[in-house]
Image (cartoon, rainbow, N blue to C red):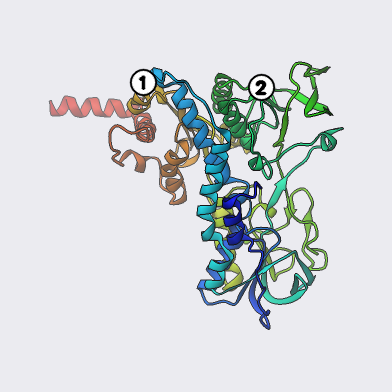
Amino acid sequence: MSGDSFDIELNQNVAPPDWISPTPARRYHLVVIGGGPAGLVAAAGAAGLGAKVALIEKHRLGGDCLNYGCVPSKALLKSARVAATVRHASEFGVEVSAGVRVDFAAVMERMRRLRASLAPHDSAERFRGLGVDVFFGAGHFTSPDSIDAGGQSLRFRRALIATGGRAAIPDIPGLAEAGFVTNETVFSLTSLPRRLVVLGAGPIGCELAQAFSRFGSQVVLIDLESNVLPKEDVDAARIVQESLQRDGVEILTNTRVIGVTRSGHEKQVTVECGGAERGLTNRATDELLVAVGRIPNVAGLGLDIANVAFDPRSGVRVDDHFRTTNRRVFAAGDVCSKFQFTHAADAMARIVLQNALFPGRGNGSSLVIPRCTYTSPEVAVVGLTEAEARERGIVVDVLVEELSHNDRAVLDGEANGFARVLLKRGTDRIVGATIVAANAGDMLNEITLAMTAKLGISSLAKTIHPYPTQCEIIKRLADQSQRRRLTPFVKRLFARWFAWTG
């Protein structure tokens, strides 16, 4: 943290230094450990229903999303997109004679200002006003139905573990000694690193590699896999990889980092690529960003004492109702799920409220959870990819529309992308979709709604879209599906009809 007025404002909201913990109630309907998205949604929802609720947070309310994740990263990505747009202004007939100069300090100050402006929604004072007892400190179970919060014992009828996750740190010789940043510390940088090496080409690695390259850093992106975004559709990953390279990112795939050394302010990264050891002799870096995945925060919670089963790598074990092996205790969010997204944590917390406070049977398997990587272009996915469908033995029909056939995308200069929908073979049922577009995350919502409501793709063919919009590509996919119904047999029937009525 820079310690400027915006960080002070942030802390006053989400970790007030003068906060006085309340006197605990005799027993709570719900005690929540962790004040990230899942914990905040559950605490606010339960209190709104009239339950007696306690919320325990070790560091800052808002969790990764507000402090180290979605909010600060998207502020940076917006600044980076503006810089890229200005650089390419001449493609739109606009001349910017002075060129582009990025004031990184101003970019980071904007991020801190906007983050602080959003903090009141997650503030301790707001939740106290909602009727939640807020405790700061490390919470841990002291029995199957009690939790210690900063030395005070809280008894509960139900509890929710919502402690989230943190950046995974690979076991690389010299890494710790050389120093590095993760998503939790990269937003504390006050000066732009001239050279940046990023370990991990997943969503976080790709987003930040592209942003820092657009700001002016010389960026090298390294990953063990054969392409960036290895969990996504290979065609989508290829487009993103090409976009990163156009923005100046050097990408080393099929590459393993085997050592890091430091000399003064420089770090030297040694890699193994294709079996041959070589040093990045001409790529000494000023900063190293580790983005190789995340692990759940389960240490120090006293889960054994609470009879809650867990794994240090995969997190707390839950059933489809998000109940742990202790029937009084539930879990939601990154600490128990492979869907490590703010919106997924929110959805899980709502199911926990139903099941923990009432005789509910809400289940996680009913959730349709989309995801989006906010590179340029974005990659938005819901349901299965083609590779996942093959792995599960699901035979699908594939519909694809290129953005180059969409008028608005062409006019916007954003025609490099596509929309792909998977239908269960011979049916109207959508089992997955991938969109690669400038605003793919927004465009995907129509398909997510159809899948959630169990509407076939034909329902999207009936939906009228304003012209011109990039979302029209969804209707074109639906029209494709309709045309596939025009089999040779149907065509013969139509030919007879028109012959008879002619």
Which residue does the numbered mark 1 point to in the structure image? 94
Which residue is drawn at the image coordinates 66% and 59% (left, top)?
Answer: 162
Q: Secondary structure at mark 1?
A: loop
Mark 2–mark 1 contact, CB under 8 Å?
A: no
Front position in the image: 450 or 92:
92
Residue type at mark 2 is Ile
**Between marks 2 and 1, how big is the CA–CA gap?**
31 Å
Front position in the image: 86 or 306:
86
Front position in the image: 425 or 299:
299
Front position in the image: 153 or 281:
281
- Vertical placement of residue 78 versus 94, above or below: below
Which residue is drawn at the image coordinates 44% and 49% (left, top)?
Answer: 454
Query: x, y percentage for residue 499?
Result: 17, 24
- Give the quarter of the figure containing the C terminus: top left
Tell me, for residue 251, which label it has, or none: 2
Among the 4 quarters of the image, the one containing residue 302 = bottom right
Q: Is residue 138 left or right of residue 321?
A: right
Q: From this viewpoint, is residue 243 visible?
A: yes
Q: Is residue 6 left or right of residue 82?
A: right
Q: Secondary structure at mark 2?
A: strand
Which residue is drawn at the image coordinates 66% and 25% (left, top)?
Answer: 194
- Residue reaching furthest left? 502
- Vertical placement of residue 435 versus 58, above or below: above
Residue type at mark 1 is Val
Q: Nearer the viewer, mark 2 or mark 1?
A: 1
Residue count near mark 2 (Cα–Cα under 10 Å), binned few <14, some 14–19, many ≥20: many
Q: Is residue 198 left or right of residue 395?
A: right
